[in-house]
Image (cartoon, rainbow, N blue to C red):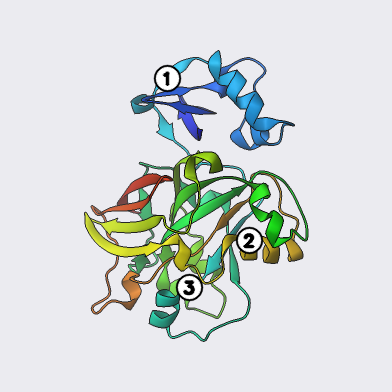
Amino acid sequence: MKLVSFHAAGRPSWGVVDGAEIAAIGLTEGAPPSLRKALEQPDAMAKIIAAAKGAPRLSGRDLVLAPVLPDPDKILCVGLNYENHRKETGRDEVENPTIFTRFANSQVGAGSPMIRPKASTHFDFEGELAIVIGKPGRHIAKADAFGHVAGYACYNDGSIRDWQRHTHQFTPGKNFMGTGAFGPFLVTPDEVGPLESLRLVTRLNKQVVQEARLGDMIFDIPTILAYCSTFTRLEIGDVIVTGTPGGVGAKRNPPLWMKAGDVVEVEIDRVGHLVNPIIDEA
């Protein structure tokens, strides 16, 4: 099942992808107001499937897609989680995942422009796999980790590199408005299957700039969930962005920065194809 958040006639809603149409569950009377709220229901997936049968159908072409989860309690991001990216940055090997945060209001949905801010021209791409939590928990055991996953989506953790490097903390460079793209939809684990062999590709203006298998992660998903759930309670609808492969623009010679008029894509086998144009901040 593919779940999506969107705006229709200026109203936020959510639903289930049904071919070229969306079963707009959020527009039906009494429906949960957001996908996050829907996932918080007991037996959430069964209720969503049942509700989709009677929901109005909308053409996907007529909708403005929102970030898959517009209202997460938190977004946790993993840095330096592919060996070729760690090496290109010159960072030392570490025993634990590098975690930083992104704010929900820095995100856009599939098809919406990612925004290069006035403050910098160093706007970089980072194609990644995002996890959405479907079952809350603290101290999650690695063996139980996948039972806490509602699904997967593509993510572009767009980064303002000079601001990221102002100090040892990543946060400023990861949270400019409109720099993180999340979508187009959430795919449930039963449709994705095993992750290790799936290919992640980032393209800039149709040229491949990043490519890896998800199995190339240094810290796998069970390790990430176990680690993060030790220092914070993971809530339903939380987003964990799992890291980017090597090939980022900042480490190319000369550097390759995204600019107005560019189109950036993140594609992951069986998960989705996220496409966003780039514009300058007004």
Q: Which mark is residue 58?
A: 1
Whole-percent x, y for residue 85 in the image = 41, 75
Drawn side of residue 198 relative to residue 14, left or right: left
| Quadrant in the picture for residue 209 | bottom left
Whole-percent x, y for residue 153 in the image = 48, 47
Report how far apart the C-alphas of labels 1 and 3 lie in the structure: 40 Å
- Give the mark nearer the N terminus: 1 vs 2: 1
Please name whichever residue, 11 or 231, is drawn nearer the observer in this view of the structure.
231
Q: Label 3 amino acid?
A: Gln
Residue at image mark 3:
164
Q: Residue at x 33, y 63 (%)?
A: 211
Q: Label 2 amino acid?
A: Pro
- Give the mark nearer the N terminus: 1 vs 3: 1
Residues tagged 1 and 3 counted as in contact (Cβ below 8 A): no
Mark 1 crowdedness (10 Å alpha carbons): few <14, some 14-19, many ≥20: some
Of badges 1 and 3, nearer the viewer stands: 1
Report how far apart the C-alphas of labels 1 and 2 lie in the structure: 37 Å
